[in-house]
Amino acid sequence: MTGDVGRRAYLDHAATTPLRPEALEAMLPLLTDGFANPSGAHTESRRARVALDDARDRIADLLGAAPGDVVLTSGGTEADGLAVHGGWEVVAERHPDGPPPAVVCSAIEHHAVLRACRALSARTGAELREVPALPDGRIDLDALAEACRGDVGLVTVMAVNNELGTVQPLADIARLVAERSPDAVLHTDAVQAVPWLDAAAVAAEAALVSVSAHKFGGPKGVGALVVRHGARVRPRIDGGGQERGRRSGTPNVAGAVGAAAALAATVAGRDDDVARVRALRDRLGDGLVARVSGAVESGDRDRRVAGILHVRVPGVESEAAVVLLDEAGVAASAGAACSSGAVEPSHVLTAMGLGAAEASSGLRFSLGVTTTDEDVDHALAQVPGVLDALRN
Amino acid sequence: MPWRRFPASSTPCETRPVRVLVAMSGGVDSSVAAALAVDAYGTSGVVGATLKLWGGESDSGCCSVADVDDARRVADQLGIVHHVFNFSAEFEARVVDPYVTGHVEGRTPNPCIECNRHLKFDRLSDRAAQLGFDAVATGHHARVDRDPDGTWRLLRGADPKKDQSYVLAMLGQDQLSRTLFPVGGMTKDAVRSTAARMGLRTAAKPDSQDVCFIRSDAGRAGFLGDRVPLHAGRLVDHASGDDLGQVEAVELVTVGQRRGMGHGTDGRRRFVTAVDVPARRVTVGPPEASMASSADLTTVAWVDAPVTGADGFDALAQCSAHGPAVPCTVRPDEDGLTVSFASPQRRVAAGQTIALYDPGRPESVIGSGVVR
């Protein structure tokens, strides 16, 4: 390998982002002097309560919601689970005598949604309809229309797919659900949308919206479910009744404050960041497709968020590629990693109609606001050689 | 370090450092293998890899998240990089499916051997070569040696109770040239004391038992019963043809089995002499009826070049992982090999492996085959 020895390019921002300096700065006082439990009756608690309420107001405002609509959680996964289980239960309670309302999800959901839907179905007997995607990574709207019948209680479709970055047609989906499944509550996992799209506009399309702070420069362990448009959720964690009874547990004040600061910085810088990162992403994509024979960029660039580049290289196993890319100083991803760290064949690519070999040949390079020209230069210097070596 | 071969085999002009990929199951043997590899090649020359083989439930073996954690933490302690490779699709296709099919067809495959054949010394060694490694090291109790003429030899492990050369007897020259067994020259006690001395968290971990993808509470019956229908069958006397009763599932009965077969009218224990799954019939007889003077092998593998010639050659045959190696004569035939035992042996079930050793050098494997 040639190039700058020891240099690394972190191109896995869709997995997680570095903490924004604004978030760190905002959190530090809450991790030191402002440590108190916001639920107490004393001065220390009141200070923490103010910080928490300010953070909630700010998050709500930036998402175009009211403070009371925001349920703070331990992250995107918990928000998704609360929406799927807790949102469905409220609908099911309205139909105590009929069969359990059906659930509709896209087959390319993040596991936090997909496995929650499957667990809900197994637990309650509710029929689950998994709707496939088209080869461009967008949900098949005809198949969605077929699945959305009058018996549906919950529909969940992600705003942006985490592997390909494909933006889903949420407005069309919302219209379709309202027409065909009037009893259904619509949830969207907007975790990958917030860094790149107008978050308030995305959030306006669904009654239940999940976000996760560490995807936009906030701390890990903080997320939120926005609950609006008459929707409600049954709690999944019982206890002291925090978050208006929807999510018990001592609030993560520092986390909420960090999330609010990161979200504010994200929204403030979004237009410039999106344009800059999109140009970097396109340069990386163009360079890889030009230099790696057979490499195919997945999905239509116009329909994908700025930060994600997904390429498939026939004959290359992505599990081997990420090891060699790592040695070459490029941090990339081969798809969804399971808890043991093994790479699973992508259920997203499979749901788009690709075979097992092709579904194991996908590589995701995801850029963020901290990505530089030099990162892209480094990747373009290293990646083609690695992929060519693996194919020979 | 008698196991250490590189860079002896590297070309003289090559200055690139040797790189070894250690297959780490999360057990004590492969933990110590990794530690010894680090002693020999340094932390920059060694990378650990744990294979995710089985996606289903298991309570032992080499693929649970807890075992991956142990492997990763040992790698962390040794200061080496650790990866997890997901070979579960190949494991299902190459090991689990044939295991199930074998039982349906009245054969008893050895899944550990098929895993070594197709996963550890094929898929993993290919991956290792692809990633630029010179060799794969594992924690098996066996040794690799090289004759003065350059021929690689597969030898029994130094600890006779733990010797695993039987389950490695399919390895050939190319694979042996790229394989290291760092603990093969050690006793198990020495492996454990080394691990304890180094403070490795796996030092006192129990040895893995049985088949890694079968849970002990469900057993083979539960595992196979979840996948294929099991059929009750008749128990028949080998000589008289008399009906002796019923067996719950013919698919679970193995030739040579004694357990559950009861006693004959003469009071002696009965052994299974034949299993006919389609006919739902298990044939049993007294000990002498379960003996065989020969066995026919397919899927033959040789450590070195195939031994040919119509007259055959003398060898020692080992018919199970820790069974005795008995004298035999081996003759090639159209479909593989015929092994003729010097004295009759307990009949070996179809699907089981017979490993052949060199009578002039009883530690040394000649090759192996699967009973037809």
Image (spheres, rainbow, N blue to C red):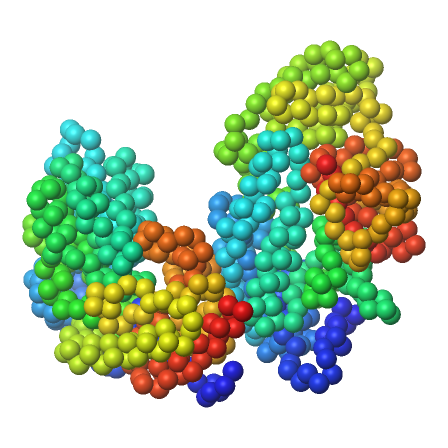
Asked if B156 appears above or below A95 in the picture, the reply is: below
Q: Position of residue B263 (x, y in %)?
A: 76, 19
Residue at position x 31%, y 85% from top? A373
Quarter of the picture holding the C terminus of chain A: bottom right
Viewer-nearest residue: A158 or A363: A363
Asked if A34 appears above or below B96 in the picture, the reply is: below
Residue A305 visible somewhere in the drawing:
yes
Exactly how many numbered labels are in the figure? 0
**With B42 as the anchor, is B155 left or right in this view?**
right
Determine which quarter of the picture holds residue A57: bottom left
**With A159 as the anchor, is B334 left or right in this view?**
right
Q: Position of residue B99 (x, y in %)?
A: 60, 40
Determine which quarter of the picture holds residue A136: bottom left
Residue at position x 69%, y 38% from top? B351
Q: Position of residue B113 (x, y in %)?
A: 67, 48
Residue at position x 44%, y 85% from top? A7
